[in-house]
Image: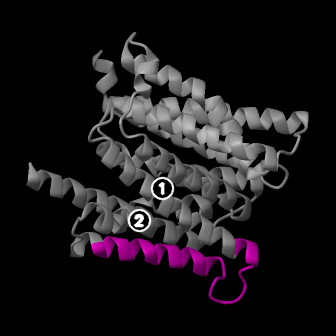
Amino acid sequence: MALRHEMRRGVLFMLGACALFTLMSVLVKALGDRIPVVEIMFFRGALAVPVVLLVVARARRGRPVVESLRTKRFPGHLLRACTGTAAQACAFYALVLLPLAEHTALTNTTPLFITLLSIPFLGEKVGIHRGGAVLLGFAGIMVIALGQGAFSGALDQAARIGIMVAVAHGVFSAGTTLLVRLLSATEASTTITLWQSLLMTSFAGVALPFFWVTPSWHDLALLIMIGLLGGVAQVMLTESWASAQVSALAPYSYSSLLWAILFGWIFFADVPGLLTLAGAALIVVASLYILHRELVRRGRRA
């Protein structure tokens, strides 16, 4: 069982998960002009539920999976599912409007907003180090927007909305992360994961009749692939976290930017400009520095 705690294994699973999630984004982007986002979200969630149940069953080691649904904090799970649904909707909608590389860079802003939201919601004090990193990250967002022509009048309305929605994803994703921190004080990770999967799929299912577009056989195959890729990537991500510390694996999660550049070039002939690459680099550096400062703070408390 020592194999389950090898850094190399964790890195390989993380790189694979990032590749599959990015490939899933390629399919979402390809379908976005024909299939409503809500419909894509439903297939993504519904086909991932069996995968989540499998992960939970493995974690419970033979004990009934239904026991993971027992909770005294259902409103917290409900709110977490709401922010998670909003984050996923923003991410998928922004994919339709932005090139893959720009989208990936902007949706990696979650650590910046976690730092900001932790002030009012967790009562944390943000010092000069983390505050400076947040400013650096927002500078990266501005650089990417500059590269898209946001300040020269060259940016069209769709791309402008895409940038705002991608950044909004960071806000909702940060809110989701903070809610997980609060819930994890009393709830098991399997309980949090299972309620999230079931509730988010239910939300999309309730809205689905109002947005349903009957897909062609080709599009149906792509929708199924989105769900399967997302589910497999989710398992790989779980295995990655089980193999090494999350803080050690965090830098490798930004390999999604490299995959986005590669897949964007292969499938959409998109080549990011220098400003996009520079802005993405600023966001990654800022996020990693925030992680570093968080580890330093934990070490001091210990």
Q: CA distance from mark 2 to mark 1?
A: 8 Å
Residue at which label 1 appears? 173
Dot 1 lies on which element?
helix
As rendered, which of 282 and 128 lies closer to the eye? 128
Give the residue displayed 38% in from the left and 12% down from the top: 63
Left or right of 201, for residue 83: left
Q: Residue at x 64, y 83 (%)?
A: 150
User: Magenta span covers which residues?
Assistant: 131-159
- Tell me where residue 247 appears, x and y as whole percent: 30, 46
Visible residue check, residue 299: yes
Q: As rendered, which of 261 and 200 lies closer to the eye?
A: 200
Residue 97: image location, x then y, percent: 72, 64
Q: Quadrant of residue 130?
A: bottom left
Which residue is depicted at the point 42% across and 17% down?
A: 58
Horizontally, is 156 left or right of 183 in the view? right
Q: Quadrant of the N terminus?
A: top left
Amino acid type, mark 1: Ser
Is residue 13 visible from the viewing direction of this image?
no
Residue 167 image point, x, y percent: 54, 67
Residue 144 colored in magenta in the image: yes
Report if the CB atoms under discs 2 and 1 are less than 8 Å apart.
yes
Percent x, y for residue 64?
43, 13
Main secondary structure of the magenta stretch: helix
* Mark 2, residue position: 113
Element under disc 2: helix
Residue 14 drawn above or below residue 144: above
